[in-house]
Every structure is written in C-alpha cells, then in structure tokens.
Image: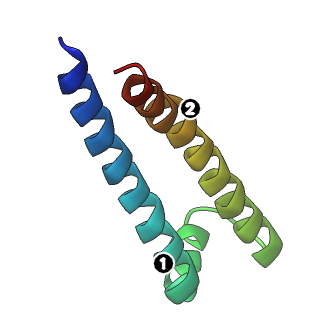
Amino acid sequence: MDIDFLRSFLLCCTAINYLIIVIWFLVFVFARGWLKRMHCRWFNLSDAQFDGIHYAGMAVYKIGILLFNLTPLIVLSLCR
C-alpha cells in the first residue's frame, strides 16, 4: 500500500462516516417521533433517556471519526 492509496481510502471513509452522522442527526431532528416509537417498541425509554442516548451515541461516533479517520488523513497529508 502506498501513501496515496491510504490517503484516498481515509478520505472516502471520512466522507462516508460524516454522511452517516449527518443522516442520523437529520432523522433525529426531523423524524424524532418515528425514531422514538421505533425504539420504544423494544425499550421503555423516557424522553430524557432517549435524547441522552442519541446525543452520547453521536458524540462517541464523531470522536471515532476524528480519531480513526480524520487524524490519520491529516497526518498523511502533512507528511507528503
């Protein structure tokens, strides 16, 4: 594997992961009722628990993107 391949791979991974988190956020904001009904079929969640779980999930996912995709991409771009 060469550096150009890794750079393009990490760029694609970063773009896909940010697309996923944006879709998650948009569904959470604009289809919150549907999302809550779907989750409440399986779990008995209050509004605060539901919001907290999704907020924490988005935060962990975004930190994962930063650590495993964006930071290596920036490092490889700077090492050129």
Give the number of the disc on residue 12.
none
SS state under label 1: helix
- At a point 64% along the width and 45% down the height, the residue shown is 60
Q: Quadrant of the C terminus?
A: top left
Residue ID for mark 2:
67
For this orientation, the residue located farthest to the right is 48
* Whether residue 39 is situated above or below residue 80 in the rendered picture: below
Observer-nearest residue: 28 or 42? 28
Residue 20 at x, y percent in the picture: 39, 59
* Whether residue 11 is situated above or below residue 52 in the rendered picture: above
Give the number of the disc on residue 26.
1
- At a point 37% along the width and 61% down the height, the residue shown is 19
Horizontally, residue 12 falls left or right of residue 30, namely left
**Tag 2 or tag 1, which sits nearer the N-term?**
1
Observer-nearest residue: 17 or 2? 2
Horizontally, residue 49 falls left or right of residue 8, namely right
Observer-nearest residue: 80 or 55? 80
SS state under label 2: helix
Instruction: Kindly identify the amino acid type of the residue bearing the numbered disc 2.
Output: Leu
How far is mark 1 from mark 2, CA to CA? 23 Å
Question: Which quadrant of the figure has residue 1?
Answer: top left
Instruction: Kindly identify the amino acid type of the residue bearing the numbered disc 1.
Output: Leu
**Number of other residues with Cα within 10 Å of mark 2, as a class: few under 14, some 14 to 19, many 20 or more:** few
Residue 14 at x, y percent in the picture: 38, 45
